[in-house]
Image (tube, helix red, strand yellow):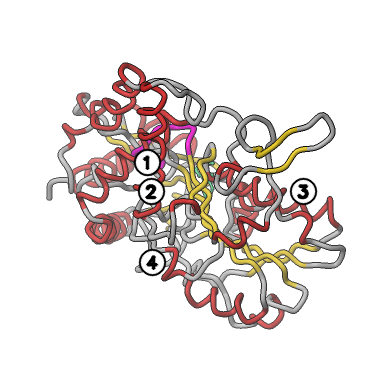
Amino acid sequence: MTSLVQKTDFPIFDDEKLIYLDSASTSQKPKIVLDTIKNAYESSNANVHRALYDLGSRSTELYESSREIISDFINAHSSKEVIFTGGATESINLLSYSLEKKIQKGDEILLSHMEHHANIVPWQQLAKRCGAQLKYLPLTDSGDLDLSKKEQYFTNKTKIVSITHMSNVLGTINPIKKIAKIVKSIGAIFIIDGAQSVSHMPVDVQKLECDFLAFSGHKMLGPTGVGVLWGKLNLLNDLEPFLSGGEMIEKVTLDNSTWNEVPYKFEAGTPNYIQAIGLSAAVKYLKDIGMDNVRNYEETLTSYALEKLQNIPKIYIHGNPKKRGGVISFNIGGVHPQDLAQFLNEDKICLRVGHHCAQPLLETLNETSTARISFYIYNNFSDIDKLVDSINSTIKYF
Ligand code: C6P
C-alpha cells in the first residue's frame, strides 16, 4: 500500500531511506507549508493590527484569515473563539492562570492517569496557588479510562476537568462526548487536550460539547511555535488575561488598564503571525485530504503494525490491542528501549523512547521507559515492514 499522500510532497523524504515513526512528537512539513512561510516573509511581512500601510493590511488580512480557516476546521461558532498561542503547553498554561480566580481552597481539579505533563504540571501549580486538590481518573488494564466509579471522581467540588482526547503513549481515544455529559451534570469546566487528536481525526468542538480545546500546530504539518486555544466565547469573555502588554489592551493609563476584546485580550505582544499563516496552509492541506480519510488510513496502518509487532518474540504492547489512534508503545524483554533506538537509527528509523513526558502513566504501566512508534499520512506498510525487520535483527544481536 502506498502512503495516503505523496512522500514527495515532503522535502525531508528526499532522503528515501528515512523512516519517520515519531509524528506524535512532531510531524514533518509539506512543501506547501514551507513555501507559504517563505512567501509570507518575502512578500507580506509587517506587524499585524498596527501598521496602516498596505503591507501591514495584507499581513493582518492573512493572519485573520488563518484564524477563520482554523475556526472552520474545528467547527467553532466564531473565529473570535480561536486564540493563537505558542502550542498546546502554552494554551493549557494560559487556562491554568486565567481560571485562577474561579478556584477556591478545597475545590477539585480532575485529570487522568494518562495525561501528558503539559496537562498535569500547570494544574499542580494552580492547585498549590489556590489550595485546590487534584484527582486522577484511573485506567483499565487495556489502557482505557475507567469510568466505573465515576461518582468518586466527578463531585460537586469538581471545578475543572481536563482530559486528553488521545493518549500520546497508548493511543487511547477517550469518549469525550460521554465525559462531557458527566461534566455538564456537575457544572464544571471541561478542557480537552487535543495535542494528539486534532491532527489525526475530525474534531468538531460543537459535537464534542467541551468548553476549551488546546492543540499544537507542529504536530499537524504546521510550523513550530504556534498552537491554539479554542474556548466558548462567553467563557473567554469572562476570563482574566494571561500575558499582558501591547495589543491586549483597550486603554492604558499610568495607574490602570482595560482589556481588548477576545481573542486579542489573550494575544499580548507581537503574535506569531507568520507561523499562524503557515498553520493555515497545513490545515488546508489536511482538509483537502479529509480528516475522515486521515483517521481511516491511520487505523489501517495501526492494525497492520499491531498484527506484525505481535509476532516479535518477547514483545509487550501497551494499551488496547485493537482500538486506538496511530500510536503504539512497547517493550521487548532483554532489549532496553534506548539500545533499540540506537540500533534502529542505524537503519534510519526514527522512533521515540523514554517516558514520553508522561511519567505518572509510565509508573502505572510499571515501566520507566518504552519504545513508541507513531504514524501519519506519509507512512506506509513498507515503513512498518522495515521496522519489524530491524527490530528482529536487533533482538538477534542481543
Ligand atoms: N507530546 C510527544 O512526543 P507541545 O509540546 O506544547 O506542542 O505539546 C504538548 C503535549 C500536550 N499533550 C499531549 C497529549 C502531547 O502529546 C503533547 C506533546 C510530544 O508525545 C512531545 S513530549
* Closer to the eye: label 3 or 2: 2
- Measured in 3D between alpha carbons, the distance from the residue under mark 3 to the one under mark 2, in whole angstroms, is 30 Å
Task: Say which label, 3 or 4, has the lower sequence index.
Answer: 3
Identify the mark nearer the N-term, 1 or 3: 1
Look at the numbered disc 1 and give the secondary structure of its residue.
Answer: helix
C-beta proximity under 8 Å, tags 3 and 2: no
Indicate whether 72 appears above or below 136.
Answer: above
Chief secondary structure of the magenta portion: loop
Question: Type of residue at label 1?
Answer: Ser
> Which numbered circle lies on residue 239?
none
Query: How would you rate the neighbour count of disc 4 (Cα within 10 Å): few for under 14, some for 14-19, many for 20 or more?
Result: some
Residue at (59% x, 79% y) in the render: 182
Residue at mark 4: 321
Q: What element carries label 2?
A: helix
Q: Name the residue under label 3.
A: 125
Which residue: 39% across, 28% down?
57
Can you name the residue that lies furthest to the left here?
Answer: 1
Contact? badges 1 and 2 (CB < 8 Å) = yes
Label drawn at residue 70: 2
> Does 74 sit above or below residue 125?
below
Q: What residue type is labelled 4?
A: Pro
Hey, what amino acid is under mark 2?
Ile
Choose between 312 and 112: the one closer to the eye: 112
In the rendering, at what x and y percent does residue 371 appear? 45, 45
On the image, which quarter does residue 106 sit in?
Answer: bottom right
Helix or strand or loop: what does disc 4 sit on? loop
Q: Position of residue 358 (x, y in %)?
A: 59, 50
The answer to whether residue 169 is seen in the rendering is no
Residue span colored magenta: 219-226
Q: Distance between the residues labelled 2 and 4?
A: 33 Å
